Amino acid sequence: MHRRTTKHHMKEHIHARITSKRGRRWEAAMSDTNEEHRDGRRGPRGKHGHGPGGPGGRGGRAKRGAVARSILLLLSERPMHGYEIIAELEERSERRWRPSAGTVYPALSRMEEKELIAGSEDDEGKRQYELTEGGRARVADFDPDAPAPWDEIGSGGGSDLRSAMSELGGQARQIGRFGTAEQREAALEVLTKAKKDLYKILAQ
């Protein structure tokens, strides 16, 4: 009986060491991935710039004032709800840019205070926005030859790379939190291989 108990304890001890080792390897890989992801989003002189999507969003990087100008241009076509504006910008930029609700709705409030737009409740009780005379005058002052803000969002290059890094990090974190030991081990192998392949690209 004593010998069987000792063997059982030894098996538990070995399993705990293996699990601990795998956990440390996974945390190290995730640390490297997250660090590289953060470095990819650094702005000039090592300072962090805006997150993905430029000011308040995900995807490509938007220029300053792009959100307000986009809102005015969209509302010059028809009245819209706030969530319609967000979805429309994502669609027109071919999913390169999706300003967050935390950016769009405060912008709508500021523009309403400046009397560039007016908000009212629709039949379903949702707030809808449309241009005022002042808003239409502002749109008329825009350069007709200038590209729309959603067309200026970077496509390809660093923009696509940042987007891919963001998606990769999110998937890896999901596996780390909810995956089985086998899934974490398989994901670790994928990340390790990806790191090696990236170093080969840098060495070219």
Image: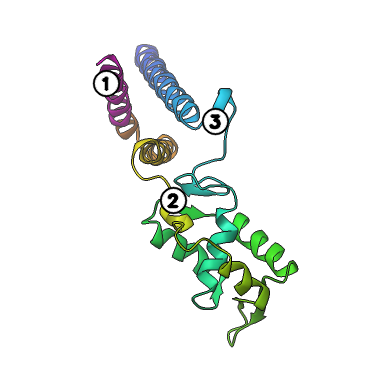
Query: Which quadrant of the figure has residue 110?
Result: bottom right
Q: Residues within 10 Å of mark 1 (few under 14, many from 20)?
A: few
Q: Where does residue 55 sit, x and y in percent of width and height? A: 57, 47
Q: What element carries label 3?
A: loop
Quadrant assignment for the N terminus: top left
Query: Which quadrant of the figure has residue 186?
Result: top left
Mark 2–mark 1 Cα distance, whole angstroms, equals 29 Å
Mark 2–mark 3 Cα distance, whole angstroms, equals 19 Å
The furthest residue to the bottom:
123
Q: Where does residue 202 sit, x and y in percent of width and height? A: 30, 18
Point out the tag, 2 or 1, that comes first from the N-terminus: 2
Indicate whether residue 187 is drawn in magenta.
Answer: yes
Q: In this view, does 110 lie to the left or right of 49?
A: right
Question: Can I make out residue 82 in this image?
Answer: no
Residue under the point 50% across and 29% down? 38
Residue type indicated by callout 1? Ile
